[in-house]
Amino acid sequence: MTYFGRDEGGQAALTDSLFFLAIVSMICTLLFYFLINYGATVEEQINSFYSGDFAMDTLKVIAYVNVMRDGTSIYSLTGDNPQYDYLLAMIKEDYAESSGNQNPSLNSATRKAIANTVHSVMKPFEHSVDYAFYLFQEDSQKFLFLLMGVHECKKSGTECEKDSSGNIVGSERRMYYCIPASPGILKDKVFPYVGKVDSATSKVFLDKGTSKDLSAVTGVGANYIMSLDLWISKDVNNLWGLDSAANKADFNCALIPKTDYE
């Protein structure tokens, strides 16, 4: 005797089980995928928060650290009556003295103080981070200055040092003081090639020197953006030899001697 209902019931139960397993597998796969992406997103946000916080703290230290009035490090204090000041105070004073010119500039002592201060603050990350520190005037779309700290190949004369196989040997820190004409120089010539950039910015008012009471000043100064951009150091051919003739039109840089900041 044959019982057709029993076979059909068994097949139905097997089919239901397969569908159930397929649904559970799909849910587990989606859940696993979601958890991985959620963890990666959280990690990225934490790293971004840490990097941004680090950049802002670094910018504050650079602006308000003490430097010698001749531009040297505070650690080089000599004599019985050393003269020192905040870096930002030196920049403001220098700007006020030169603001009568069509294009305000900073003197050699202030430029030396900027290079020495930024290098000292960033020294713990000497081999891993490159940076750009600058003051930019939004209304006129002009840089007061742009300090670039990048790694380049070690050179023998004008050529990079190479081993017997022709591979470039090592790299070294080089710092440049630049006054670029293009307001988009960093976005066009730097950021596309260096990867993720962590930035910190702050507004700074620079007085033209016509009033001693900054609280009463109206229309006699300019608002600048003070910014520090950081990125993981890497070999970027576009950033080699920023003082070379090939880069002169874009960056308008001068190499800062190591004696000014080491």
Image (cartoon, rainbow, N blue to C red):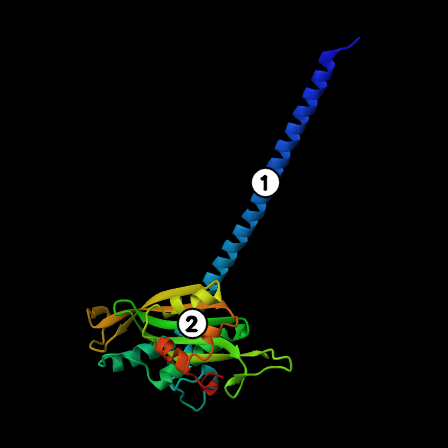
Height in image: 101 above or below 222? below
Query: SS class of the residue under badge 2?
Result: strand
Residue situated in front as seen by the camera: 75 or 160:
160
Amino acid residing under circle 1: Leu
- Residue that appears at 55% across and 78% down: 171
Query: SS class of the residue under badge 1?
Result: helix
Q: Quadrant of residue 208?
A: bottom left
Disc 1 marks which residue?
31
Height in image: 98 above or below 128? below
Residue situated in front as seen by the camera: 159 or 171:
159
Using residue 99 as the reference point, say whether residue 238 is left or right of it.
Answer: right
Residue 10 in the image: state x and y as whole percent: 72, 19
Mark found first going from the N terminus, 2 or 1: 1
Number of marks drawn: 2
Residue situated in front as seen by the camera: 199 or 247:
247
Disc 2 marks which residue?
132
* Direction top: furthest residue: 1
Residue situated in front as seen by the camera: 183 or 66:
183
Crowdedness near tag 1: few (<14), some (14–19) or many (≥20) residues, C-alpha within 10 Å: few
Amino acid residing under circle 2: Ala
